[in-house]
Amino acid sequence: MSYTEQEKQQALSLYDETGSIAKVINKLGYPTRQNMYTWIKNRNIEKKKKVSVDYSDTPAHRRHPSLDLKLSIIHRCFKEGEDIKSVSEETGYSRTSIYLWRRKYVVGDCLH
């Protein structure tokens, strides 16, 4: 059976309120358990896809950060022991970049 977008949203909204697929089905009389699992899964995938990264070069977030900033981030993560994910989210530079800067620093390669 096919459901309208409004019916899907109503079911998902009720699921968000109750946290129970069974309660949604009992209250609305639709959809099937499998439909709910699919709608929830697809909704989560769509939310993840909508996350966009702004790669613009602004004074607040340089595409190519200064050596001082890179060294500061490396120091926070690997000397002070701050969580790399947290530092990454705070500064806006990926964990991959932070690990790359550290690797270059350790082998004595230029960080520019």
Image (cartoon, rainbow, N blue to C red):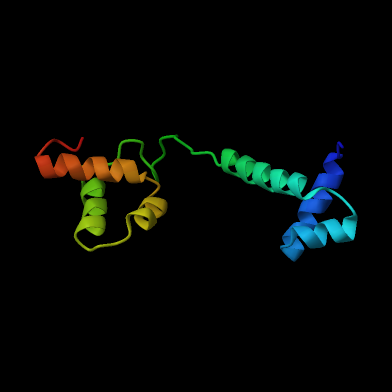
Quarter of the image for the C terminus: give it.
top left
Q: Is residue 38 left or right of residue 53?
A: right
Task: Indicate whether 5 appears above or below 11.
Answer: above
Q: Nearer the viewer, residue 55 or 82?
A: 82
Question: 75 or 62: nearer the eye?
Answer: 75
- Apparent side of residue 22 relative to residue 45 in the rendered image (left or right): right
Q: Is residue 91 above or below residue 5?
A: below
Residue placed at 86% from the left, 36% from the top? 2
Q: Position of residue 12 (x, y in %)?
A: 76, 52
- Foreground pick, 6 / 97: 6
Q: Position of residue 16 (x, y in %)?
A: 73, 59
Q: Quadrant of residue 108?
A: top left
Residue drawn at 44 percent across, 35 percent down: 55
Q: Is residue 46 left or right of residue 90?
A: right
Q: How many marks?
A: 0
Residue 112 showing in the rendered view: yes
Q: Position of residue 82 (x, y in %)?
A: 29, 62
Q: Quadrant of the N terminus?
A: top right
Residue lying at 37% horizontally and 51% vertically, measured from the top left: 88
Q: Vertically, is 24 above or below 2?
A: below
- In percent of the image, x 83 and y 48: which residue is there? 31
Q: Is residue 66 something one can see in this rendering?
A: no
